[in-house]
Image: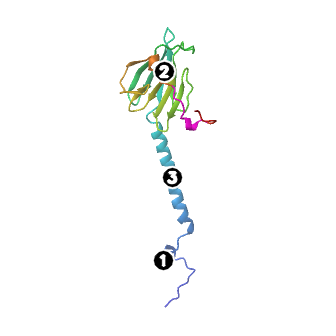
């Protein structure tokens, strides 16, 4: 019988002992590849539907007007006229605002809320005391829901403005009112 040399790297001996680096390298490489693939997939899903686009202008009498567009949802020319209001904003040429980044600057009004994690997301505008909400499922004007349709014209009048909401008294600092 021949004696077996323990230092002899025979195929039988090599198969029983695997280098320690493989134990960490293979899962590490798989984790990095998986992360890159899923990160790019998520980034694509966040922006594939595109953003809300709102065109701001004023009519000849100074009445502010907004037109809402969202190509992926097939929404176009949803117009909101803010009757009874006037704006001094320089809107001789219509200004188109894309809501693809938070708190986009507006020619008039302000962005009260936006959730743009997955576009088109949700955008809420406050313009002259009127609230305009754009959600993929519906359009809200002064908290009244309307189904999306192409080319409607909505008029928001001064009597439709939302009342100012006072904060609850428990959140006010200072002496309690009688």
Part of the protein shown in magenta: 164-172
Residue 120: give x, y in percent of width and height: 45, 33
Main SS of the magenta part reads loop
Residue occupying the point 55% across, 35% down: 169
Which label sits on residue 145? none
Query: Distance from label 3 to label 2 (Cα)?
Result: 42 Å
Mark 3 or 2, nearer chain start: 3
SS label for mark 3: helix
Separation of disc 3 and disc 1 at Cα? 33 Å
Is 52 above or below relative to 171? above
Q: Is residue 7 visible?
A: yes
Point out which mark residue 55 bears: 2
Residue nearer the viewer, 79 or 168: 168
Q: Residue 54 placed where, x, y %? A: 48, 23
The residue that disc 3 covers is: 33
> Could you tell which of marks 3 and 1 lies nearer the N-terminus?
1
**Residue found 44% across the figure and 23% down from its top:** 68
Name the image quarter holding residue 74: top left
Q: Which residue is tagged 1? A: 12
Residue 48 highlighted magenta (yes or no): no
Q: Is residue 171 magenta?
A: yes
Element at label 2 = strand
> Above or below — where is 142 with respect to 13?
above
């Amino acid at each position: 019988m021949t004696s077996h040399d323990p230092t002899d790297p025979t195929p039988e001996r090599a198969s029983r002992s695997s280098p320690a680096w493989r134990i960490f390298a293979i899962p590490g490489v798989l984790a990095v590849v998986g992360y890159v693939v899923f990160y790019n997939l998520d980034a694509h899903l966040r922006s594939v539907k595109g953003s809300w686009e709102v065109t701001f202008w004023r009519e000849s009498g100074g009445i502010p007007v907004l037109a809402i567009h969202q190509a992926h949802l097939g929404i176009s020319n949803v117009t909101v006229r803010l009757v009874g209001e006037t704006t001094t904003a320089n809107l001789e040429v219509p200004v188109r605002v894309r809501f693809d980044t938070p708190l986009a600057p507006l020619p008039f009004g302000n962005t009260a809320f936006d959730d743009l994690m997955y576009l088109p997301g949700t955008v809420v505008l406050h313009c002259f005391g009127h609230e305009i909400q754009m959600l993929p499922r519906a359009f809200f004007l002064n908290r009244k829901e309307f189904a999306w349709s192409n080319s409607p014209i909505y008029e928001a009048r001064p009597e439709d403005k939302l009342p100012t909401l006072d904060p609850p008294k428990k959140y006010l600092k200072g002496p309690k009112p009688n």
